[in-house]
Image (cartoon, rainbow, N blue to C red):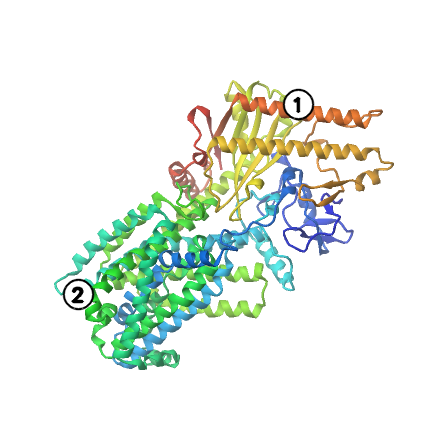
Amino acid sequence: MTNEGLDRENGGSMDSTESRWVFQDEDDSEIDSGDRDTVDWDGDDLTPINGLELDSEDYEDNNVEEQKLIRTGPRVDSFDVEALEVPGAQKNNFEDVSVGRTILLAFQTLGVVFGDVGTSPLYTFSVMFSKAPANGNEDVLGALSLVLYTLILIPLVKYVLIVLWANDDGEGGTFALYSLLCRHAKVNLLPNQLRSDARISSFRLKVPSPELERSLKIKERLEASLTLKKLLLMLVLAGTSMVIADGVVTPAMSVMSAVGGLKVGVSGVKQDQVVMISVAYLVILFSVQKYGTSKVGLIVGPALFIWFCSLGVIGVYNLIKYDSRVWRAFNPVHIYYYFKRNSTKAWYSLGGCLLCATGSEAMFADLCYFSVRSVQLTFMFLVLPCLLLGYLGQAAYLMENHADTTQAFFSSVPSGAFWPVFLIANIAALIASRAMTTATFSCIKQSTALGCFPRLKIIHTSRKFMGQIYIPVMNWFLLALSLVLVCSISSIYEIGNAYAIAELGVMMMTTILVTIVMLLIWQINILIVLSFVIIFLGLELTFFSSVLWSVGDGSWIILVFAVVLFLIMYIWNYGSKLKYETEVKQKMSMDLLRELGPNLGTIRAPGIGLLYNELAKGIPAIFGHFLTTLPAVHSMIIFVCIKYVPVPLVPQNERFLFRRVCPKNYHIFRCVARYGYKDARKENHHTFEQLLIESLEKFIRREAQERSLESDGDGSDSEEEYSFSRVLVAPNGSVYSLGVPLLSDFKDTGKAVMEETTSEELRPGTSSESLVSDAEQSLEKELSFIRKAKESGVVYLLGHGDIRARKDSWFIKKLIINYFYAFLRKNSRRGIANLSVPHSHLVQVGMQYMV
């Protein structure tokens, strides 16, 4: 097999974005370790391997027995010639910011990220002692010791010091971890990956290390096993469903525990009145969500700062006034004595103990709103010290007041400061409720981009930071469910158990995914990985066993809700995968287009037709439906595929990839518009059209440049000299040798899979000057044709492909596809809605696939 890439002559940098690692077999032929070249094949020519559609070259490469890793320069495919302009790696929005900006971000994190964990002192001891009543000072010390070490191990060690670094270029959450894994291994079940995706500058794959061999074995195992891919997806979906469930139970728990302080300040207040006030608070909370994270963060940041300072001051006051001996709780032996005295009751109380770590996942899921450093600094130097002082102060009070455990926090507040603290506690509770709500929005956007959640309307609330979003439908959905939870389960003890279930579910999924990241991507020592998974997964399983034992007290509602969300996401992913695979199988043959001729068997009217489809390769079957349905088609057709790739952001100059589908006189192109899951598709249709046409013209000019280089080398004395003596200077200054012509014809048993015009081929006796002149004329003629077509107008051709289960399918498959998936698809937002295209520019045709 010959080398089809472009070998860098000038050595190349050691940066992983400037070079690549490939396998090399014994005869020195290279095999790209990423996706191979993708060309247009007829449906019958595809060979399915492990669920992916590969061409014959892919199939041959899988038979290589002995391989070794070598470093070589970046490769360029005719499908994305413009990728030669790849700039430096795209940096996160928060990198290299000033000290003042970091401090401002750290201040904002109080109101957005730490509200949840900051209000945990309101209810942690109350829920713990409802399961295991305090019978003496030793029980208080044991419970405090449990809380202190839970707070240190889970929020600090696991999340702040480890998990935050597993972010995907500033994006956090379970789907960000899944995206990170999809980028390093082909574990995505949707077979629309392209080799060119790996050359997006923000891909930034890690170069090999001494742990590479183990990493490659894990990668091969994941890619080869369909069962492991499905299991990985199910773990991610389960974690995401728990995050959304957290977004329901967090507002209910925070608000009710804060309002419940009225029963301490006013003796006549009943629980029903607490519920009514909580309902009013929740309505206000979700109503202001639309104003965005930055605006609300700046407003509530000072309030949370006052709250954390109040926790610290009250804690110090109680330590001085009551019993400073509670510092002994830092000795973990008190945990042993606590379990020895209370046994089963102490085990039940673990669910309440975990509540001190609620909001830990919000620190990771909300990372897209802020920088890692700002979150770490705020937690370690403000949040954690204040929380520790707050819990120590409560324990000091309870050492002398064992009967006040039902409202431990408000009972420990000095009488003169009760109402100011009650007011700031309620404000903090309202703010805390937003923590998981913003995390929910972030996770839903990520899952939607990766094909695992129905499309919803997403509003970007910040012009500067694209990760700050608001989803109206989910906002009111979360409000409704929170109100149902508050009205149906009025006890904070039962809500606390549901809270712990949701929190532990996402914590365990995060632990498993970060473990895979450590093995596959970080490639760190296996002993460190084993220590991480044994300590934290073992700890979380222990907590989970405790809360599951009490699931019958009403907290089962949150489990049912999480299961429903899981099914929605899995059904959407399953239906989308079947639809894509069916479109791949039924795509049009290139032979048919060649038989139809340049006019495609119909009339070619002036203008550009943008045919939207989901295929990244091949001619969609819906195009044949357009040819038979419409009286005429446009003089230029561009197949547009909106494709989300597993990176947070795709630079604008790397957005579009083009390939000529047929001979030049057909004027048919394919365009893949690539977006990251963090990208905001806010451009109107005029802007989108302008960017697309500019990128198309750039592609055609580069294509002509390559042909000119090929023509210059034809006068060499031998074929060998022709093949290896030519060079190409890329726009970024890199020098490449042309081993094989980039745009040479692909041939397979007489069937051309991509044809190019032959008008520029060398003819005997033709001078190089006349050849260059002909090439320039041909280029200007085609560019002029594009401009005239653009002036005639651009029309969006939308093919709505629906799927139905075959009559001989299983009953469950019919139920899922014909009813559940059809309902979700009917009520989801169509992808074209983001471009705000006028109806006068739309032509829609429906088509049904049987799966």
Q: Nearer the viewer, residue 274 or 26?
A: 274
Query: Is the N terminus in the top left, top right, bottom left or bottom right quadrant?
Result: top right
Q: What kind of element bears circle 2?
A: helix
2 or 1: tag closer to the N-terminus: 2
Q: Position of residue 476 (x, y in %)?
A: 31, 46
**10 Å neighbourhood of mark 1: few (<14), some, or many (≥20)?**
few
Q: Nearer the viewer, residue 507 or 835?
A: 835
Q: Residue furthest right?
A: 717
Whole-angstrom CA distance, mark 2 to mark 1, is 83 Å
Q: Position of residue 540 (x, y in %)?
A: 41, 66
Q: Where is 612 relative to 201, above or below? A: above
Residue under label 2: 265
Q: Position of residue 729 (x, y in %)?
A: 72, 41
Please name the residue shown 41% across and 67% down the image: 381
Q: Nearer the viewer, residue 587 or 427?
A: 427
Kind of residue indicated by mark 2 = Gly
Residue under label 1: 781
Please name the residue shown 40% across and 60% down the image: 505
Residue 418, can we see it?
Answer: yes
Q: Nearer the viewer, residue 251 or 847?
A: 251
Q: Where is 663 relative to 110, above or below? A: above
Residue 748, can we see it?
Answer: no
Q: What kind of element bears circle 1?
A: helix
Kind of residue indicated by mark 1 = Lys
**10 Å neighbourhood of mark 2: few (<14), some, or many (≥20)?**
some
Looking at the image, residue 654 sits to the left or right of residue 839; the answer is right
